[in-house]
Image: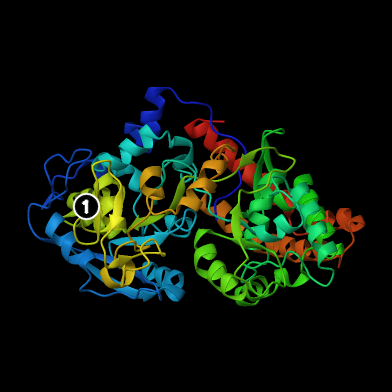
């Protein structure tokens, strides 16, 4: 999930921003990056923003493919055949089950057998492969990608992109890029219960506490709040959204180091005052019988069952959970029941939300650089993953076949096509039958495109969340190879200790009077040395590449 962050680099001048977008200054680019005379077979002479990429000869590019269990790969999908018609490119997938994807990706890269294009790679995952030289510093080749360069400049993505940079100032991942931060996860509440108790939808965590107490008073044997998303990260979603309200990180967004804006330095996340205050809040809910202790261990199915049968009234959610998991079963059990996803409540940090506009993207193997079709491949990647036309194609499919568009630009599924219940009468699933809205290819883009598949209810949620101030991203602290090796010896032990004690404090298994002892334990696990290493790396990066 998106990390919770504190502050941006100082605004760059137009010239400095252009310099940042190209990865590093021209003097530091190698001749290998600039001499592409032998790698232009099949490429267009000069691809422009918004122009259809079409190879000048038939091309085939190998790609690592994460096969989703809900829509397993079919090579006869319309996605592939139409892609070939438009671009002249055939993709040659190496299929890997989604459950094994990360492990298989590492093995293939390590053995030098990975396909040229490696999608479904989240920011930070590429760092493991930088030192080996097996993946390409893609920032050296942004001049081949006019659509991506245009979006970085137009959407002022420089600070977000900077978080990807390594010690050499370059980045090795082409991320999915969004025009704006996209919040999805929050809490689902039974609004019919709120109405019965004459309560308003809570807008702060303190108000949620009050609502839960009223629910408990009306239903003494219940746990009003019984949560999901406990496996494999206990409190993954709840801690992630709650942490931003306390100026820290937690759950899915936890990292050992967080930027302390007041101190203008990195601090250890699990030792921050805000982290302690967050745990104290949750402990209060548990101690008062308002939050089910099983929230941090139970399966999603168990939590959902409690919610839809009326044993609980609050649960974590995203947009699809409401439509798919909660509302149909809840309505069947109790036709009068109503449920909504509420905006994330505010806390001590104010009306803010954390997040990044980057999501999973793709790596390019170093051996792809040697291909005579390298330039064409980078142009193709730029069109499919970063052009407005390519992104619309990957998401919606083929106009006239899977969707139609009116004069105002509003897209509607054709009569027999459906996705997430937007066209309930449709008998063909967009993903299963056609291969569109596929997580390997469809991500990022304009806010209009992102929200084009949102329900009216979700659009209301997004509008309310958009009123929050977006917290700036943390500045980068790329480690050297030696520092990364040292940090890896400390990071897991530190995080494991934080995770274990997080639950103990929340559940009351450890008293907060022992917080100083907990901090001492972190010090014995090299917390201080780790934070010093992070700050040293950050200061070096600022000195070598600019920023704050």
Q: Residue at x 44, y 75 (%)?
A: 100
Q: Residue at x 72, y 45 (%)?
A: 204
Q: Depth check: 537 or 408 in front? A: 408
Given the current orientation, which residue lies at the most extreme right position?
513
Q: Depth check: 369 or 486 in front? A: 369
Colouring method of the image: rainbow
Vertical comparison of 91 with 208: above or below: below
Q: Quadrant of the C terminus?
A: top right
Find residue 375 and report its horizontal and vertical position in percent: 19, 49
Q: Quadrant of residue 399?
A: bottom left
Residue 92 in view, yes or no: yes
Q: Quadrant of the N terminus?
A: bottom right
Q: Residue at x 49, y 26 (%)?
A: 11
Please give the residue where the numbered disc 1 appears in the rendered image: 380
Given the current orientation, which residue lies at the most extreme left position?
57
Left or right: residue 392 versus residue 278 is left
Q: Depth check: 129 or 100 in front? A: 100
Find residue 57 and report its horizontal and vertical position in percent: 7, 56
Left or right: residue 89 versus residue 487 is left
Find residue 331 and report its horizontal and vertical position in percent: 57, 70
């Amino acid at each position: 999930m998106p990390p919770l962050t504190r502050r941006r680099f100082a605004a760059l001048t137009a010239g400095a921003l252009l310099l940042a977008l190209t990865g590093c200054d021209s003097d530091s680019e190698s001749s290998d990056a600039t001499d592409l005379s032998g790698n232009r077979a099949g490429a267009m002479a000069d691809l422009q923003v918004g122009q259809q990429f079409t190879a000048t000869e038939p091309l085939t590019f190998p790609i690592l493919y994460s096969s989703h269990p809900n829509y397993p790969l079919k090579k006869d999908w319309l996605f592939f055949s139409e892609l070939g018609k438009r671009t002249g490119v055939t993709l040659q997938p190496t299929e890997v089950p989604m459950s094994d994807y990360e492990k298989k990706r590492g093995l293939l890269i390590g053995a030098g057998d990975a396909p040229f294009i490696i999608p479904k790679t989240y920011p930070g995952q590429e760092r493991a492969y930088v030192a080996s030289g097996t993946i390409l510093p893609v920032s050296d080749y942004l001049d081949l990608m006019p659509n991506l360069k245009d979006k970085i400049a137009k959407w002022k993505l420089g600070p977000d992109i900077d978080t990807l940079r390594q010690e050499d100032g370059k980045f090795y991942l082409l991320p999915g890029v969004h025009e704006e931060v996209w919040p999805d996860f929050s809490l689902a509440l039974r609004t019919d219960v709120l109405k019965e108790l004459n309560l308003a939808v809570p807008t702060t965590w303190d108000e949620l506490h009050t609502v839960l107490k009223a629910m408990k008073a009306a239903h003494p044997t219940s746990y009003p709040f019984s949560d999901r998303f406990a496996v494999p990260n206990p409190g993954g979603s709840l801690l992630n959204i709650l942490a931003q309200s306390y100026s820290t990180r937690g759950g899915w967004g936890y990292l050992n180091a967080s930027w302390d804006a007041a101190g203008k330095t990195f601090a250890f996340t699990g030792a921050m005052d805000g982290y302690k205050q967050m745990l104290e809040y949750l402990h209060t809910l548990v101690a008062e019988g308002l939050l089910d202790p099983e929230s941090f261990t139970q399966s999603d199915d168990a939590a959902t069952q409690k919610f839809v049968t009326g044993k609980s009234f609050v649960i974590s959610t995203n947009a699809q959970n409401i439509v798919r998991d909660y509302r149909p079963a809840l309505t069947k059990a109790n036709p009068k029941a109503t449920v909504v996803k509420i905006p994330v409540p505010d806390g001590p940090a104010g009306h803010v939300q954390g997040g990044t506009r980057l999501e999973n993207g793709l790596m390019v193997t170093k051996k792809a650089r040697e291909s005579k079709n390298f330039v064409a491949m980078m142009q193709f990647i730029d069109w499919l993953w970063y052009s407005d036309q390519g992104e619309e194609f990957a998401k919606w499919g083929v106009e006239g076949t899977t969707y139609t568009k009116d004069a105002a630009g509003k897209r509607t599924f054709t009569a027999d096509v459906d996705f997430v219940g937007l066209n309930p009468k449709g008998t063909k699933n967009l993903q299963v039958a056609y291969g569109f809205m596929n997580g390997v290819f469809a991500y990022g883009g304009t806010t209009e495109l992102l929200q084009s598949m949102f329900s009216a209810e979700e659009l209301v949620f997004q509008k309310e969340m958009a009123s929050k101030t977006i917290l700036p991203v943390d500045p980068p602290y790329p480690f050297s190879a030696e520092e990364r090796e040292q940090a890896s010896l400390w990071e897991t032990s530190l995080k494991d200790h934080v995770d274990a004690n997080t639950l103990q404090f929340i559940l009351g298994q450890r008293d907060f009077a022992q917080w100083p002892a907990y901090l001492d334990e972190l010090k014995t696990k090299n917390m201080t040395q780790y934070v010093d290493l992070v700050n040293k790396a950050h200061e070096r990066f600022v000195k070598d590449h600019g920023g704050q």
